Image (cartoon, grey):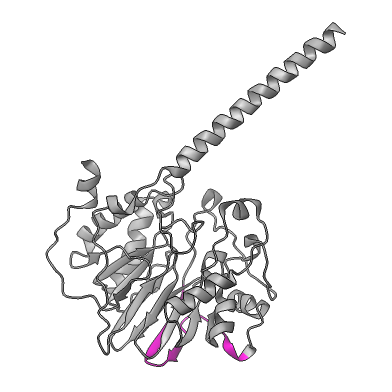
Amino acid sequence: MRFLTTLARWVERLLAGLFALLALAALIVTMLWRDRIHLDELPVAAAPESRGRPGEVSVTWFGVTTLLFDDGETQVLVDGFISRPGLIDLLADRPVDNDAAKINWFLNEFDVRRLAAVVPLHSHFDHAMDIGAIANRTNASIVGSASAANIARGAGVPPDQIIEVADGDEFNFGEFTIIFVRSGHAPIGWRGEVPLAGRIDAPLSMPAPVSAMRAGASYSVVVSHPAGSALVQGTAGVREGKLDHLSVDTVLLGVGMIESLGRDYINRYWRSTVTATGARMVVPIHFDDYTRPFGEIEPAPKLLDDFSVSLRIMEELRDTWDRDTELYLPAFGVPMPVRPPPRQAATLPSVSESLER
């Protein structure tokens, strides 16, 4: 009897200790998750705002890599991620669904009424989750990989609105020309793997867990127009030399977790996208926490990705290889000109100088 009493006390102490350790671990993780750089602390100028002049083509950023190109007549949407599953949904891999109310609000609030094409860069949930729901509301064509096409089919998008692409394909929508260049996904997963690699081989209906939305083929996409051109690089997949024959005004550069890939990798990534195309404006995208509600822009936690470090490296690479190129931060829902305005004298300190203060 005394043995059982002693054992019970030891079990109670062990459980109390484990509970205390779990509580401490939860507190540490919470503190680390909240440790993030604030955008207003970064001495990088906001991207110039489009003035809506006749003949001008603009691009508007809606978080992650969702971008709306507009020339006043035709609209092209790169990616489609309006619904925002929460962190618990992602960690538990629970089935998630399109947020119909938020998608409707987005289309109405930002006057998305002339949409000709939806162009997913690859088929991860944070790029392609809502492409079918958007196409069904706008009659826009979905132009993307075979995996993206299966997301569209699962949403019931009519077959004549679905276009599967291959490396080098070009498509015209109004005065826009969309060029697809086969790329790769950044190797940011465990041991340098691509997260959620693989294809979507059958129509995928929502709701579905995010793990069902495999990457499929990744593409660099050039959106060209007589009034300006842009390269949209949604993820840091380096395929050196693939873009050497192209020239653009602006690069919208996916920088999610590039800090973890090392300086040499980032150097090759920058030179293969920015230097290779001769761009005069670089706007980083995919730096924000995609578990936040649509419209709330916060950089990812430093625990996962320190955006200030990525910016510092990009600034150094710009100063080394592309001194005539401006580096800007986008603002949610604010149109930017695809063709940058004339360069102005710098009025802000560098990222490195600011962070050293």
Q: Would residue 8 be counted in the magenta stretch?
A: no
Q: Position of residue 291 (x, y in %)?
A: 51, 56
Q: Would residue 168 be counted in the magenta stretch?
A: yes
Q: In the rendered image, is residue 246 in sight?
A: no
Q: Residue at x 46, y 40 (%)?
A: 32
How many numbered marks appear? 0
Q: Position of residue 259 (x, y in %)?
A: 39, 51
Q: In the rendered image, is residue 105 in sight?
A: yes
Res 160 → quadrant: bottom right
Q: Position of residue 41 (x, y in %)?
A: 28, 50
Towards the viewer: 179 or 87 = 87
Image quadrant in which the C terminus is located: top left
Whether residue 169 is situated above or below residue 10 in the rendered picture: below
Q: Is residue 14 left or right of residue 139?
A: right
Query: In the displayed image of the protein, which residue is found farthest to the top?
Result: 2
Query: In the displayed image of the protein, which residue is found farthest to the left?
Result: 345
Q: Is residue 94 left or right of residue 85?
A: right
Towards the viewer: 273 or 89 = 89
Q: State the predominant SS element of the stretch in magenta.
A: strand
Q: Residue at x 59, y 27 (%)?
A: 21
Towards the viewer: 147 or 299 = 299
Q: Is residue 353 left or right of residue 291?
A: left
Image quadrant in which the N terminus is located: top right
Whether residue 65 is situated above or below residue 166 in the rendered picture: above
Q: Position of residue 332 (x, y in %)?
A: 37, 66
Residues rendered magenta in the picture: 160-182
Query: In the displayed image of the protein, which residue is found farthest to the right?
Result: 1
Q: Residue at x 20, y 59 (%)?
A: 319
